[in-house]
Amino acid sequence: MGSRQIQQEQPWLLENGNPKVLTKEARHGHGRSRTAHGMSSSSLRKKSDHALVSRIRCASLRNVLVNIQEVILGTKLSILFPAIPAAIVAHYLGLGRPWVFILSLLGLTPLAERVSFLTEQIAFFTGPTVGGLLNATCGNITELIIAIFALSSNQIAVVKYSLLGSILSNLLLVLGTSLLCGGIANLGVEQKYDRRQADVNSLMLLLALLCHLLPLLFTFSAASPELTVEPSLYLSRSASIVMLAAYFAYLIFQLWTHRQLFEAEDEGEGESNEAEEEAVIGFWSSFGWLAGMTVFIALLSEYVVDTIQDASDSWGLSVSFLSIILLPIVGNAAEHAGAIIFAFKNKLDISLGVALGSATQISMFAVPLCVIVAWIMGVKMDLNFNLLETGSLALAIIVTGFTLQDGTSHYLKGLILLLCYFVIGACFFVQRTPNDPNGVNNITIKSVTDSVLSA
């Protein structure tokens, strides 16, 4: 009787002809421990009506249509999906490469949001711990794939700029906009959040900053910067291993020993929220869609890396500005919008979990992983992001730490973070760096110090 009821009401949950039974613990226990990223992404999803699809008698066709309805049309960003075939067509027809660049960026936006949705669907069948690991691995898959393609093209500067831009946008733009909008929307309410999660992420960010500062400061310690190139590379690789070990410990802390600090519970939604905490597609369907989405992300990421220089030349904007400002804003637009929506609802713990969690994941996982991957590929990438870039990162982390130190928020804090982001963005907008055949900035610490001494 139970199998027949599942087959009639939710046939899309059938896998290999047998219904996948979800226990109460798997359904509701997982729902109570959803991460901030999952909560943020869910704010952009649309509820699907299966009334028309359920009338189709052919089970296979019905299953396919329900999958398309949930995966392709089940997001408010579905309007951007046509940009994916448009970018592919523009690439093969040889249209303007800047058009390929912007279409690829637009196509990456819904793909990144759907990856979050699919990893959450898989978590319903594997449990919250495996789901958390999937989210930690796939949460910034767009940035990782873009970085890997850039490394394969020896464009080290693009890798550094894009990863730095993701950290800055999360700490200043996303968090600042969330605090500003939340403060304005809740003027008569004292906004509070749990400082414990913010403190943990701040400590991880400070460790990442130390690992970036040491190779930079190491250059000052020698009489000539050329003498520190190889030692700095070895130091960066060693520091990257330490950062990955620290991130692994952070995952244990987040998913096992202190999970309660990172749980994001959307209170006040009642029973309507429980309905959303059930799988809408099967496990293997989710896995197949996730693999397909990853392939398209890889394809569009390759287009972005290949055309970013042409877009820079055509629009008169530096590669550093496009990589630090434009790539993170467009690539993570879905996650950022979700954080702002929850700030409007006075749910700052979720907004902080998204912004600080993403910044921590990129700085402690994506950046050192790229250094290790570059080491394997024979590419000499270090953690020295140069003086201007590292200084911007340090100031962003320090300002964010001071902003979150008292556990309360108001709109002025968000405004200050946004203004900091605008000033840093203006700095990279006016910056013009010479092209380097290896894709690395030619400006060295020695030229800076020499100019200061000569003055």
Image: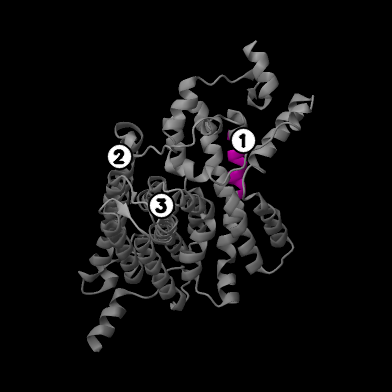
Residue shown at 23% from the left, 71% from the top: 220
Depth order, front residue of 394/30: 30
Task: Write down the residue under mark 3.
Answer: 355
For the residue marked with disc 3, what is the amino acid?
A: Ala
Residue position for label 2: 249
Residue 355 drawn in magenta: no
Where 121 sits versus 316, above or below?
above
Q: Nearer the viewer, residue 152 or 313?
A: 313
User: Of marks 1 and 3, which one's residue comes earlier in the chain?
Assistant: 1
Q: Which quarter shows the C terminus?
A: bottom left
Dot placed on the residue nearer the N-terminal end, 1 or 2: 2
Labels 1 and 2 touching (C-beta < 8 A):
no
The quadrant holding residue 214 is: bottom left
| Residues drawn in magenta | 287-296
> Answer yes or no: do the residues labelled 1 and 3 have beta carbons within 8 Å?
no
| Numbered disc 1: secondary structure | helix
Dot label at residue 288: 1
Please name the amino acid that badge 1 sits on. Answer: Gly
Decide whether the magenta segment is chiefly helix, strand or loop: helix
